[in-house]
Amino acid sequence: MTARFLWVFFISLLPLVELRGAIPVSQAFTPPLPLFPAYVVAIVGNMVPVPFIYLFARRFLEWGARTKMLHSFCTFFLTKGKAAGDRLTATAGRGFFIALALFVAIPLPGTGAWTGTLGASFLGMRFKETVCAVITGVLIAGSIMAAVSAGVFSIIR
């Protein structure tokens, strides 16, 4: 059983798949893993990369902007991110936290913790605010996926 929990943990670490794939996998095992422990393991696995993404994505772009080979690519993202962040801050203000949490909460590929954290890092959102918004979104997405997975797999079995 521990090996299956490790599968759930490692699947939830993956970009694009994240806990949106890990929770259904936990219920597809025969016998299925207990839902709440699988939910917790998937959330922990999904949140592990968040601080690293936040802290190193922007630094990578800033480093790349100083190199000859990556200059145009990285400068493009830094410039666009700054402009988008300024526009979002002007229009959303404090609503940016809620917008990020809802973006992460949508259980579709490409809208999870990885993408939300990258966006927040590029847009200059504060670290603590980013982590709080992302964990809120991950908890909501995990709840949605747990409910859907439990329902789907109970029908199949």
Image: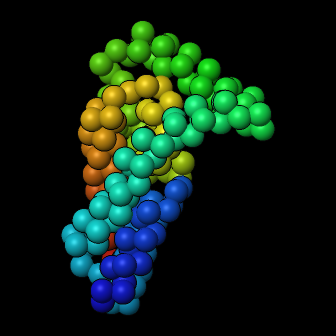
List x then y, in percent, for residue 125: 38, 27
Query: How far across and down, in percent of the image, does residue 119 sit?
Result: 49, 34
Q: Residue at x 27, y 43 (%)?
A: 136
Q: Nearer the viewer, residue 118 or 55?
A: 55
36 w.r.t. 51: above or below: below
Residue 147: image x %, image y %?
A: 30, 62
Quadrant in which residue 71 is drawn = top right
Answer yes or no: is residue 56 visible. yes
Identified at 37% across, 84% down, the residue is 4
Q: Quadrant of residue 127?
A: top left
Q: Is residue 57 above or below residue 141?
A: above
Nearer to the camera, 16 or 61 = 61
**Residue 76 as seen in the image, left or right of residue 116:** right
Residue 21: x and y in percent read 46, 65
Residue closest to the eye, 62 or 90: 62
Q: Could you tell me how many numbered marks the image carries?
A: 0
Q: Quadrant of residue 26?
A: bottom left
Report whether residue 20 is seen: no
Q: Is residue 54 left or right of residue 43?
A: right
**Residue at screen point 67% across, 26% down:** 75
**Vertical side of 87 occupied by 143: above or below:** below
